[in-house]
Amino acid sequence: MKSIYDCYTLSNDVQIPCLGYGTYKAAADESAAVICLAIEAGYRYFDTASFYGTEKYLGEAIQESGISREEFFITSKVWKTEMGYEETKAAFARTVENLGTDYLDLYLIHWPLPTPDYKDWKTLDIETWRAMEELYKEGKVRAIGLSNFLPHHIENLLENCEIAPMADQLEYHPGYTQEAAVQYCKEHDICVQGWSPIGRGRMFGDKLFLELTEKYQVSPAQLCLKFAIQNGVIPLPKSSTMERMKQNQDLFGFEISKEDMFRLRTMPQAGWSGEHPDRERVY
Ligand SMILES: NC(=O)c1ccc[n+]([C@@H]2O[C@H](COP(=O)([O-])OP(=O)(O)OC[C@H]3O[C@@H](n4cnc5c(N)ncnc54)[C@H](OP(=O)(O)O)[C@@H]3O)[C@@H](O)[C@H]2O)c1
């Protein structure tokens, strides 16, 4: 990858850019200003979700930019309370209305379980996925996928679906690389996107970080983002200032050595959000 516009090819041949902008809390001031700035900074791949409350601001920002819809890659997600066949269809209709568009580039199931103790999650996932498959077949979404699905959740779908998921969005950063899930996805041609790719800054003081940012003369955020890209994972950083937005795209003038990549992949767990689909949130 040589720029944020270079793409991976999903299993259905759709092109997906190698870095996107995450919109969670990107409209905390209830305005589209930060997302407008992100478009100005050059981002075209935007990650949103019905849960974030940012869909309508992303829609406004795209409208204001005057740039055609086709130049953007837009992902949104079905929230925990919107799962099920009919509910997912209705959720999709709300999402595209909020965004002011008539299609999504990628639509994901946000979490495999509404709550960790939800008993019949396998049936609920299959029903939700059936709606996703129909939206795909109707041409309303260019690709469909998952988020926070671990191998045992994905197996349930693969055993029962008609169309295999094309993507899975997982928490991913040095200190929390979910190796088993990432490897499973790679073996099944499921593209991995990394959420909280900067770990919201929680690993920045780690001594390996201090050593490597000095060695490569980059910021901790740049180290994290390049780490994801070199592992074939699409990072989705969120930032609020033009300087950080630009910095988070300036990743192609250095290469992390193989040895340092292994050191980052095997550092002790750090920066975990505390979220796991099968457990109550830890913190
Ligand atoms: N699928 C899921 O369940 C899920 C869950 C969480 C997140 N996500 C997605 O992933 C996206 C990113 O995750 P995230 O927002 O949790 O975390 P993140 O991108 O890892 O971190 C964002 C934080 O890092 C700061 N930051 C950004 N660039 C920086 C830089 N160059 N130097 C120093 N600090 C920097 C930001 O500050 P400023 O904003 O002040 O610049 C913000 O506080 C979300 O927006 C969302 O789209 C998905």
Image: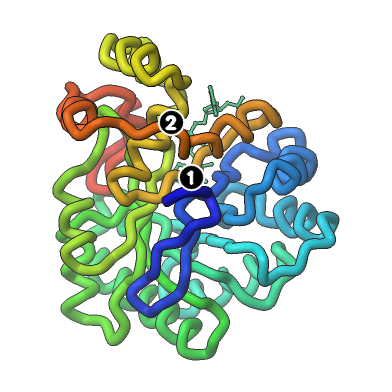
Q: Does dot 1 land on a helix, a strand or a loop?
A: loop
Q: Does dot 2 land on a helix, a strand or a loop?
A: loop
Q: How is the protein colored in the picture? A: rainbow
Q: Quadrant of the C terminus?
A: top left
Quarter residue 276 falls in: top left
* 69 lies left or right of 254: right
Query: Relative to 133, is 283 above or below?
Result: above
* 120 lies left or right of 205: left
Q: Residue 150's x, y, as percent?
A: 22, 54
Query: Relative to 283, is 55 above or below?
Result: below
* Residue 204 shows up from this direction: yes
Disc 2 residue crowd, few under 14, some 14–19, many 20+, Cα 10 Å? many
Q: Amino acid at mark 2?
A: Ile
**Mark 1 and mark 2 in contact (Cβ < 8 Å)?**
no
| Tag 2 residue | 198
| Tag 1 residue | 236
Does the closest atom of ligand 1 sit within 8 Å of the Cβ of label 2?
Answer: yes
* 103 lies left or right of 143: right
Picture residue at 74% right of the left edge, 51% below the top: 57
In the displayed image of the protein, which residue is found farthest to the front?
A: 253
Query: Relative to 109, is 246 above or below?
Result: above
Which one is nearer the viewer's eye here, 39 or 48?
39
Quarter residue 91 falls in: bottom right
